[in-house]
Amino acid sequence: MREERRRFRREVISVGVVIRYNDWSLTGIKSLDISVSGIRLTLEEEIPQGKVVNLEINVPSPPVVARGRVVWTRREETKEGKFFQAGIEFIEIKQTDKVRIETYTKEGFWVVLP
């Protein structure tokens, strides 16, 4: 079993995320988990490691808006097809959004409205 080295608790959460960079955007992205320090996403296309992107994480009222750096990417293949996972570290995020994320991950739940 791999030792967990994370400083912050991650919460499994599947919500929509929009990624923007300069003149392009990726939509239809789903999160896999989130913590105060970053988010893991599932994507249809690869985003290069090191790229800095703007994120809109569609959680209830209001969405979390952050800037992040792609720390890692990994290609996955399932019976549903090929896709990518990416780990993004938050490099700019409002303190109020950090507190929201921390509160939800400590309590072990995140209310997501349909």
Image (cartoon, helix red, strand yellow):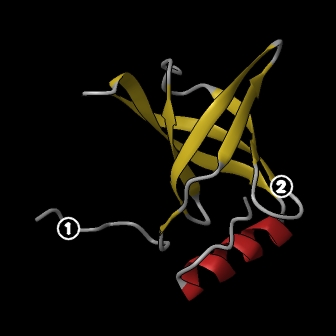
Residue sitting at the far top? 23
Element at badge 1?
loop
Looking at the image, is mark 1 or mark 2 earlier in the sequence?
Answer: 1
In the displayed structure, 44 sits above or below 17; it is above
Residue 43, x across and y down, in percent: 51, 29
**Count of numbered marks:** 2
Please state which of residues 81 and 26 is positioned toward the viewer in this rendering.
81
Residue of label 2:
63
78 with respect to 2 (left or right): right
Please tell me which residue is depicted at 56% across the width and 54% down the height of the picture. Answer: 14
52 with respect to 58 (left or right): left
Please tell me which residue is depicted at 48% across the width and 67% down the height of the picture. Answer: 10
Q: Are marks 1 and 2 in contact (CB under 8 Å)?
A: no
Q: Which quadrant: the N terminus? A: bottom left
* Quarter of the rendering containing residue 2: bottom left
- In the image, which disc is placed on residue 65? none
Whole-number angstrom distance, CA of label 1 to CA of label 2? 32 Å
Give the amino acid type for the residue marked by disc 1 in the picture: Glu
Q: Which quadrant: the C terminus? A: bottom right
Pointer 1 local density, CA inside 10 Å: few below 14, some 14–19, many at least 20: few
Residue 104, x across and y down, in percent: 64, 78
Residue of label 1:
3
**Circle 1 or circle 2, nearest the eye:** 2
Give the amino acid type for the residue marked by disc 2 in the picture: Pro
Residue sitting at the far right? 62
Residue 44, x across and y down, in percent: 50, 22
Residue 85, x across and y down, in percent: 42, 35
